[in-house]
Image: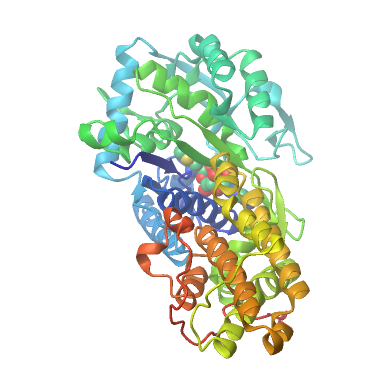
Amino acid sequence: MRPAYYLTTAIAYPNGAPHIGHAYEYISADALARFKRLDGYDVRFLTGTDEHGQKMQQTAEAEGIPTGELARRNSDRFQALQERLGSSFDRFIRTTDADHHRASEEIWSRMAARGDIYLDSYSGWYDVRDETFVNTDDTTVDDEGRRVCTENGHVLTWTEEQTYFFRLSAYQDKLLELYREHPEFIGPDVRRNEVASFVAGGLKDLSVSRTTFDWGVPVPGDDGHVMYVWVDALTNYLTGVGFPDDEETFARFWPADLHVIGKDIIRFHCVYWPAFLMSAGIELPKRVFAHGFLFNDGQKMSKSIGNVIDPNVLIDEFGLDPVRFFFLREVSYGQDGSYSAEAIVARTNADLANEYGNLAQRTLSMVGKYFDSAVPEPGEFTAEDRALLDAADTLLATVRGHFDVQAIHLGLESLWSTLAATNRYISAQEPWKLAKTDLERTGTVLYVCAEVVRIVTLLVQPVMPESTGKILDLLAVGPQDRDFAAIERRLLPGTPLPKPVPVFPRVELSDD
Ligand code: ME8
């Protein structure tokens, strides 16, 4: 039986339309999911929307519609975006789903049974945008006399209400032990140090219910309270694998192998979430990886600057695969990144049209011209031929090593440096000249190039599923020969190939 692999994205707040930051998270998680599937795993990939909380209720009030309607409308847009991005998710969860209520009640009851939930009163500042409580020490008063969060400037609301608390303070030592004993729990490494020093600074108990609004999961046994939105939101990762009723699915896929999230929600995933799970007696996820933030032309995306780009517009303009490729190749995964139309055009032309597309096209059209459109029979390999084939043969191990620690950009880097080496090789060998004097040698050179293109293409599939499918068609690689286990099966000489067509056209910047 194939080993199981369970990964998740964050579930977005559907209080508005999805933006590039959301698209980036989906594209990257999808590439990781596809990689694992092609590498022989039984993958389960969960994504969805986080529909409860005060922010959703306030946005709906401002729009004059029921909160459920706002959630449904925008959640549909998130799902449609995922589909447009080619995301291979297995379930799109909505926290208003019935099974999710059941899972949230169950984890709550288990934490309560452990003695970690108690009733008290909370008074303090609340950041509705981030759905988080803010210590008074971390607030300031802005020019307009409003109380704001010092770190991000969000305007805060004073809340005073009776709420349930979770005994987070009791988990400080256990959390520090977790980071120490399982350094792989948080990636990238720099994030672990930040989290550990935050926890080492001391943890206060966490208010985990609200009574001043009702848009949430009711607290079991006390209908006057709804759960704090992060309690139910994090629990979606359990709901997605059948917790608590579908024991078989849960046993197969839990603990999660990877939670992919953005850097702004690390505390919730690396402090609160493991503490809730420890309390409920549930195994901890193996790893949380935080990607960076995307900026538009170096500027923070914001509705007031008017530079929030609809990902659909980028796909309309540049095509899906070039957009997927751009973000994963250009931005070091785990760090912040910037994008602009100019940068997308430059990458598409340099890396896709020239380095990759042109190599495939030249190789295949020479095979068409000199070998009657059939894979040539290679003669004896020279040292150069062998060096290149050996480099291609080690790519799987190299790229797998990078993807296993979510260094997607380094995986792509190693593939593109092999393409560059192959372009140098073809320029040095000059098969178009060789064809006039030595057809056997021409066939060997083209065979080597076609093999490298095949291997690189198999490994780029997770990033550009559609275009790589076209290149594999041109190489007559059948559907049964497209997973990573097929990498070691060489192209068969004599296989007839279709007429080559360019897969990555050059692009130009449009005027508007
Ligand atoms: O945080 N660049 O939802 P959300 C990159 N509901 N990533 C970005 C980004 C940007 N500019 N802006 C946001 C929430 N993200 C919660 C999650 S999980 C149990 C609950 C990322 O809609 C962000 O870091 O604010 C997060 O991972 C995801 O988009 C959803 O953000």
In front of the other: 493 or 72: 493
Picture coordinates of residue 40, whole percent (x, y): 39, 48
Above or below — where is 184 with respect to 436? above
Q: Is residue 176 left or right of residue 39?
A: right
List x then y, in percent, for residue 63.
46, 58
Position of the N terminus, as image quadrant, is top left
Q: Position of residue 91 (x, y in %)?
A: 33, 51
Res. 303 visible in picture: no
Which residue is more in the foreground, 356 or 434? Answer: 434
Asked if one can make out residue 96 in the rendered structure from this viewpoint, the answer is: yes
Of the pair 339 and 130, the residue shown nearer to us? 339
The reply, left or right, for residue 256 in relation to residue 192 is: left
| Total numbered labels placed on residues in the image | 0
Q: Is residue 473 above or below residue 236?
A: below
- Colouring scheme, one of rainbow, by chain, secondary structure, one colour: rainbow
Quadrant where the C terminus is found in the figure: bottom right
What residue is rendered at 61% in x and 38% in y? 264
- Image coordinates for residue 496, horizontal then vertical, percent: 43, 82
Q: Nearer the viewer, residue 439 or 284?
A: 439
Residue at 27% across, 31% down: 251
